[in-house]
Amino acid sequence: MVQRALMPAEPASHRTDATYGDLVGRAHSALVNATSLPQDRFTNADDARQELFGYLRFLRTAGQHVDLLGRLVGPDAEDVRSFGRHLATAAQREGGGPSPWNSAASYLGAADDLIRSHLDLGLANRTSEGEELLTDPRLLAAARETVQLLSAAAAVRSRLTRRVAAVERGPSGDGHTSDDLFMTARRAERHIHVQGRAAMWDLHRLGIDEASPALQTLRFPVVVSAAPSPKFESALAALRSLRQLSYDQARRQVPASPASLRDLTRLGEAATTPADDWLPPPTSGLARVQ
């Protein structure tokens, strides 16, 4: 099972106690490091490509986060939601390894997962904390902060792609990074500059002009209320459903938050305990072999 965004490895206490404000603050710090672009950050072609992939991953993650916040508010934030959704699509590229951009994306993705852990698949609240904080229109202050992070990233796009091209292609001028990848970064930058302004105007119209502490204290839920479970004809049917859910989450066909992955893992562990015999007793030699 693969969740959409993983936090960088840290002591367990930092992961479990982190608030939304903590994670976004770490994303901001990583972004400051990413946008500084020191000359010695990447000096070979592989590191240069990782840098560009990490940049696109950050844009995609931030776009998905803005889209989520816009959907929680509803029709009044359609420009905000449209901006995030289209940016996530424009920056849709896979790949990348360790880089400051990837660190920023991982922290912001973890903040997004934190919010999703309070929601069900239909984005309805399933915790008391979510009921209190995720229905407050002021949560769009988080979208405003994310758009500002995106603007900072867009401001260095030209310098970043020139550095990547120079290092990756080298003296021979023969590089392995496709022009399509550079074009993707360019289109995403243009989208941020143009539609990002429309999103900021939408936020201004809604009275969101300053940062708000509305989401800063939100934490991962300790106990998540259980949703009604479907009835299965047999234990084997339940295992098939579990396998399908794992398959869909790994391929991003359904949202995968830390809470859902934890619950799914615990269910899988219980279902595969050697002490439990889930299959009916064999009634023939062939059934016994199977």
Image (cartoon, rainbow, N blue to C red):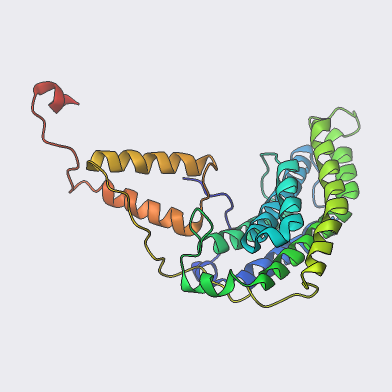
Q: Toward which corner of the image does residue 149 lie, by quadrant?
A: bottom right
Image check: 138 left or right of 171? left
Q: Residue at x 78, y 73 (%)?
A: 207
Quarter placement of the C terminus: top left
Give the x, y percent position of residue 43. 81, 45
Q: Toward which corner of the image does residue 72 lie, by quadrant?
A: bottom right
Give the x, y percent position of residue 113. 56, 59
Q: Can residue 162 be seen here?
A: yes
Looking at the picture, tell me which residue is in the foreground, 227 or 190: 227
Q: Residue at x 87, y 53 (%)?
A: 193
Looking at the picture, tell me which residue is in the foreground, 64 or 19: 64
Using the image, determine if residue 221 lies above or below residue 266: below
Q: Can residue 54 be seen here?
A: no
Q: Residue at x 55, y 70 (%)?
A: 14
Looking at the picture, tell me which residue is in the foreground, 171 or 200: 200
From this viewpoint, which residue is outermost toward the front? 75
Q: Residue at x 38, y 59 (%)?
A: 227
